[in-house]
Image (tube, rainbow, N blue to C red):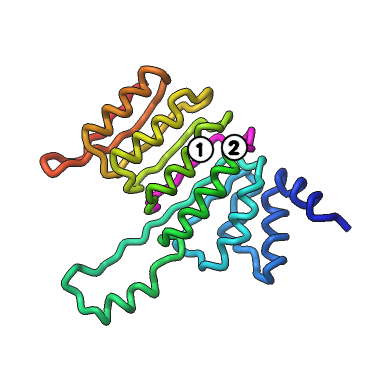
Amino acid sequence: MLDTVQIRRRGAQDFEAYYDYACAMQDSVPLPAVKANLSQGMLDFNGDRLKLTDWTPILNSLTINKQLQHVAVRSCYQSGLGIGEPERYRAGNRKKIPAIRSKEMTFKLCKALRECLTASPNLKTLQLHGLPFRERDLITLTKGLAKSVSLENLSLAHCPIADEGLEAICQSVKYSPSIKTVDFTGCNLTWRGAEHMANIIKVLDLCYELGLTKPSFANIYLYTR
């Protein structure tokens, strides 16, 4: 029988095997949506569909992983309630908010990604779409981005990171040896965000998509190479 150290060592090279093991350890069933593309070296799923307990084996597997080439986590959740909605409807709606929308879960996700980015020589694409990242999430994520030796494509499309968050991300990848494309579409950016991008364009040969928003104008998409 393998001990825990051996299981983790092998799990670092086989996400699916370790994910199955982590699920078994908590008496849960592996999710087909999570396993769908693992044979292609891709972890790609909609985080809105996962319950709180579903996340633990995924994050444990991601933390140690050195095999995956592509990681994508999406959230499409939007609250349909306006400010004037009755409180009883608000209370009912809160129960339906996906676990990935909570500050605890986005922080745990970023911690797992930090470890994966730091250790993996194979992760080339990271797509985090529509996730409500907070300041501490970005601080944690940027530590992994700064240490990655393999990441080529980074997308935080529709994550409301704003100009301050973009600045932190740009600083973390400014001297990356591998980054080629970045996508910050729909990230609540203004022209200040464009300035942050311009600063790293001077250093890196990038192709990027940047969505700028301001009350006086619509989204503008900029590309450069």
Start-end of magenta stretch: 118-131
Circle 1 sits in a helix, a strand or a loop, which is it? helix
**Looking at the picture, which amino acid does disc 2 mark?**
Thr
Rendering quarter of residue 2? bottom right
Lateral position of residue 114 relative to residue 219, left or right = right
* Residue at x 46% of width, y 65% of height: 99
Q: State whether residue 175 is above or below residue 220.
A: above
Lateral position of residue 46 relative to residue 222, left or right = right
The residue tagged 1 is: 143
Compare residues 107 and 131 and report the one nearer the observer. 107
Q: Position of residue 6 (x, y in %)?
A: 81, 49
Q: Position of residue 217 (x, y in %)?
A: 14, 39
Q: Nearer the viewer, mark 2 or mark 1?
A: 1
**Looking at the picture, which amino acid does disc 1 mark?**
Lys
Compare residues 43 and 164 and report the one nearer the observer. 164
Q: Position of residue 19 (x, y in %)?
A: 67, 57
* Residue at x 31% of width, y 29% of height: 196
